[in-house]
């Protein structure tokens, strides 16, 4: 592995070549909340040569979740006394029209935080009189766990467990972003742990169809800079491709996980914050598991998509603006009193910028 | 939420493993990595092991990933 100074030199050299070939600005997108945090934390954004800019993509599952889903989840908590909501902690504080899940809990609703999907199945087994609804959010890293939990529930005949899915697939969103004429994306820094499941070959079609480098990177400073250097090298040579500079990621990914996913789910259209409904970008339960689908079990009022007033999360997660461009950033909106999900979620861009960057614009190391 | 952190498998029983995770002992599901053996390092995401990783990679990134996990819990 090259050292940080060597990698910076490499990036400078490639960027220089690109500038001389006529590029004025090179904009790369990181499609992973963990990369967003790692970049801000390590002060790496300040190390990039001027024409090179990294923007966040729709990589934080909480941030991309449409408001209609949040409102339905809060509706379930508030209006169905027989329901216990089981959720990952990050969802608790996302504001909705009738408040957040945390506020619903404070008012007496049953909302329990789980760390692992199987804890929700266990919760249902322990409380057979209650309907346990698991809020299934997350990308490919998280979806196999949900699939296993559903299989487990069926095997153990747990009939009071269901899954309210908002799972998302990364690739259709990357394609949707490239089709937006006002967003410049010259290459993708692909998510490390999503790609552990997907494999880097999964990005091949996208790299070819759109002529964009798709490079999977790890999370420490060397690994991220190595990813950026590889993207710049591919741009400079004019040969974009899909590859990985993160050793746990293979070409094919985790085929066991892919099989379990396909056994339980199939792709379906899904709504994203700011991006609207993207064809084939979500997951629906297969017919054999329909009994575990909350949407089929409990009738919920239709809720509409909307943007939270004043919040620019939708633009932040599409790389249209930086968190610091939002007038509410660090003023009306802070991690203590978040206005939008990008400030709620520990992986949200706004939270990462707030923690590491906004004081004088200089990245403070921990 | 897509963060996975390295852990070392100490014991196996069926589809569960006992691992050392950030200084504590934890139970994780290993159904997604059926090839995992005692002594292997795995990447653990939300209670499920998703990949077996080489020991040097695991040790190298452990501190960073564990710290990010801690920040995420704050
Ligand atoms: S700073 Fe707050 S209000 Fe502004 S985009 Fe981020 S989360 Fe939304």
Image: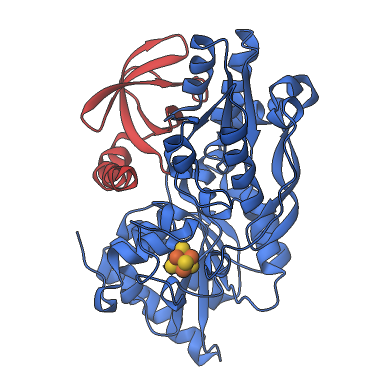
Nearest the viewer among A241 and A266 is A266
User: In the rendering, at what x and y percent does residue A105 appear?
Assistant: 45, 35
Furthest toward the right, the residue is A287
Nearest the viewer among A142 and A118 is A118
Number of disc labels: 0
Q: Is residue A346 above or below residue A180?
A: above
User: In the rendering, at what x and y percent does residue B66 appear?
Assistant: 28, 42
Q: Is residue A271 above or below residue A26?
A: above
Dividing the picture into quarters, in which one does residue A128 lie? top right
Q: Which chain is blue?
A: A
Chain B shade in the render: red
Q: Is residue A21 above or below residue A237?
A: below
The answer to whether residue A168 is seen in the rendering is no
Does residue A2 appear left or right of residue A297 in this picture?
A: left
Does residue A352 appear left or right of residue A51 in this picture?
A: left
Colour scheme employed for the rendering of this structure: by chain
Residue located 41% across and 60% down the image: A36
Residue located 53% across and 37% down the image: A142
The answer to whether residue A128 is seen in the rendering is yes
Q: Is residue A222 above or below residue A363?
A: above
Nearest the viewer among A35 and A95 is A95
What quarter of the picture does the C terminus of chain A occupy? Answer: bottom left
Residue located 53% across and 69% down the image: A312
Furthest toward the front, the residue is A107
User: In the rendering, at what x and y percent does residue B64 appear?
Assistant: 27, 48
Residue located 26% across and 39% down the image: B59
User: In the rendering, at what x and y percent does residue A2 appear?
Assistant: 30, 61
What quarter of the picture does the N terminus of chain A occupy? Answer: bottom left
């Amino acid at each position: 592995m090259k050292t940080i100074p060597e990698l910076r030199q490499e990036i400078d050299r490639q960027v220089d070549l690109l500038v001389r070939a006529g590029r004025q600005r090179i904009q790369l997108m990181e499609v992973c909340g963990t990369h967003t945090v790692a970049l801000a934390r390590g002060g790496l954004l300040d190390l990039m040569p001027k024409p090179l800019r990294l923007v966040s993509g729709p990589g934080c599952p909480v941030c991309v979740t449409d408001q209609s889903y949040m409102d339905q989840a809060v509706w379930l908590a508030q209006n169905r006394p027989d329901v216990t909501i089981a959720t990952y902690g990050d969802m608790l504080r996302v504001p909705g029209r009738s408040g957040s899940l945390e506020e619903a809990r404070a008012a007496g609703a049953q909302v329990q935080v789980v760390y692992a999907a199987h804890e929700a199945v266990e919760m249902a087994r322990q409380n057979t009189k209650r309907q346990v609804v698991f809020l299934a959010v997350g990308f490919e890293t998280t979806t196999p766990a949900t699939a296993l939990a559903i299989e487990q529930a069926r095997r153990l005949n747990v009939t009071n467990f269901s899954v309210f899915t908002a799972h998302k697939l990364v690739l259709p969103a990357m394609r949707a972003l490239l089709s937006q004429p006002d967003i410049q994306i010259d290459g993708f820094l692909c998510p490390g742990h999503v790609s552990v499941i997907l494999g880097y070959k999964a990005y091949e079609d996208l790299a070819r169809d759109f002529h964009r480098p798709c490079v999977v990177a790890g999370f420490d400073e060397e690994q991220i800079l190595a990813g950026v250097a590889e993207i710049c090298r591919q741009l400079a040579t004019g040969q974009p491709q899909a590859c990985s500079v993160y050793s746990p990621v293979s070409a094919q990914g985790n085929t066991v996980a892919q099989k379990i996913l396909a056994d339980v789910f199939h792709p379906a259209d899904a709504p994203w914050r700011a991006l609207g409904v993207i064809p084939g970008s979500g997951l629906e339960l297969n017919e054999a598991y329909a009994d575990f689908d909350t949407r089929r079990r409990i009738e919920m009022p239709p809720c509409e998509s909307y943007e939270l007033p004043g919040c620019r999360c939708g633009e932040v997660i599409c790389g249209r603006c930086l968190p610091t461009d939002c007038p509410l950033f660090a003023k009306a909106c802070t991690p203590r009193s978040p206005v939008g999900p990008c400030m709620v979620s520990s992986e949200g861009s706004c939270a990462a910028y707030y923690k590491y960057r906004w004081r004088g614009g200089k990245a403070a190391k921990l | 939420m897509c963060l996975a952190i390295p852990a070392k498998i100490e014991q196996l029983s069926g589809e569960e493993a006992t691992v050392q995770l950030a200084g504590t002992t934890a139970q994780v599901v290993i159904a997604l990595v059926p090839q995992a053996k005692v002594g292997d390092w795995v990447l653990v995401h939300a209670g499920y092991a998703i990949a077996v990783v080489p020991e040097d990679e695991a040790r190298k990134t452990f501190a960073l990933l564990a710290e990010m996990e801690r920040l995420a819990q704050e």
